[in-house]
Amino acid sequence: MIKSCLVTGSSSQIGSWLVPLLVADGWIIHLISRGRSRMSDYGADATWHRFDLSKQDSPFPELSAEVLFHTAGIASILPWIEQLHSVGIKRVIAFSSTSLFTKVASTSPVDLDMVARLGGYEKMLIAQCEKRGIAWTILRPTMIYGGKFGDRTVLDIARVIKRLGFFPVLGRGSGLRQPVHAQDLANACSQIWDRTITFNKAYNIGGAEALPYRRMVERIFMAMNKKPRFLPVPLAGFSLAVRLANYHPRYRHLTASMAKRMDQDMVFANDEAISDFEYKPRDFLPQFSDRSA
């Protein structure tokens, strides 16, 4: 059976694991990117199309594929569903986030705006796919780590540890976290693309372990071969540190509300994913290269 697909976000945390997996499984692969970047690493095993999804007045690339693996932001693909359908896409697997639920009670306007937009994007994707008879699945991961080309939250924690030698914590740091490895999410894509039980469903999926926030950070310390050291800080001090960090482009996504959530549980049962497609996430055992943190 010849399998053909289009991957958007191929250099994302998930995409960087997914494309080699598809290559090994014999897929005909098309990749879309604004620049060549790392896509040339796949050589003749994938066809690269230089295209910017944000430029809606540009002609869609000439290609033929049946499955779309959309590992970039869910909003970017919404204007292109009709074009995707016209090139043969019958199946869409897209990624959203469990932030849709964990930030719904946030006091941050930024967080609440994100929740509203993300929920709207999901509804639009579902409506457009169903209008055209495209089978969809939305995967909502918890905290993602293990990306070949960079993480966000886990690496942010590692960078703080590297620079300060300790990690500031607000409250007890008792809120449960469920980090999920990007490779496990890539594996999930390969497991569900042709499983009809997963069609037209959304799954909240996380890692195998639910760890208190403080314990999660301890694991990061140990992965960096450092003794865990924590510094309790008041909310006002943490808020000031975040405002200062926001001046750096790399940390503009940080908000003071993140500190308040250190004692909030953010875990989701994997039971449905395990039942429907034998989802098998790993324990949280981060690894860092000398350059990654």
Image (cartoon, rainbow, N blue to C red):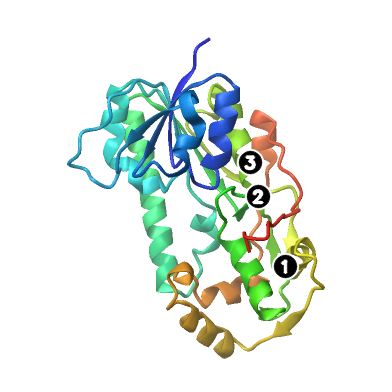
Task: Decide which of tag 1 and tag 2 comes sooner along the chain.
Answer: 2
Residue at 41% over, 48% down? 73
Q: Quadrant of residue 32?
A: top left
The residue pinned by badge 3 equals 183
Residue neighbourhood size for the residue with mark 1, other residues' Cα within 10 Å, grouped as few (<14), some (14–19), many (≥20)? many
Residue where numbered disc 1 is placed: 217
Q: Amino acid at mark 1?
A: Val
Q: Amino acid at mark 2?
A: Val
For the point 63% across and 89% down, the residue is: 234
Q: Nearer the viewer, mark 2 or mark 3?
A: 3
Q: Look at mark 2 in the image and give the residue it sits on.
A: 180
Residue 263 drawn at (x, y percent): 67, 72
SS state under label 2: strand
Residue 155 location in percent, x, y? 61, 62
Relative depth, front residue between 81 and 20: 20
Labelled pair 2, 3 in contact (Cβ < 8 Å): no
Cα–Cα span, label 2 and label 3: 9 Å
The residue at the point 55 percent across, 60 percent down is 152
Q: Is residue 70 visible?
A: no
Q: Amino acid at mark 3?
A: Gln
Q: Are marks 1 and 2 in contact (CB under 8 Å)?
A: no
Describe residue 206's horizontal placement relative to residue 85 as left or right.
right
Residue 3 picture location, percent across and down: 49, 17
Q: CA distance from mark 1 to mark 3?
A: 21 Å
- Report, in whole angstroms, how far the alpha carbon at label 1 lies from the one at label 2: 14 Å
Q: Is residue 199 left or right of residue 177?
A: left
- Secondary element under disc 1, as helix, strand or loop, is helix
Residue 272 position, x and y percent, is 65, 37
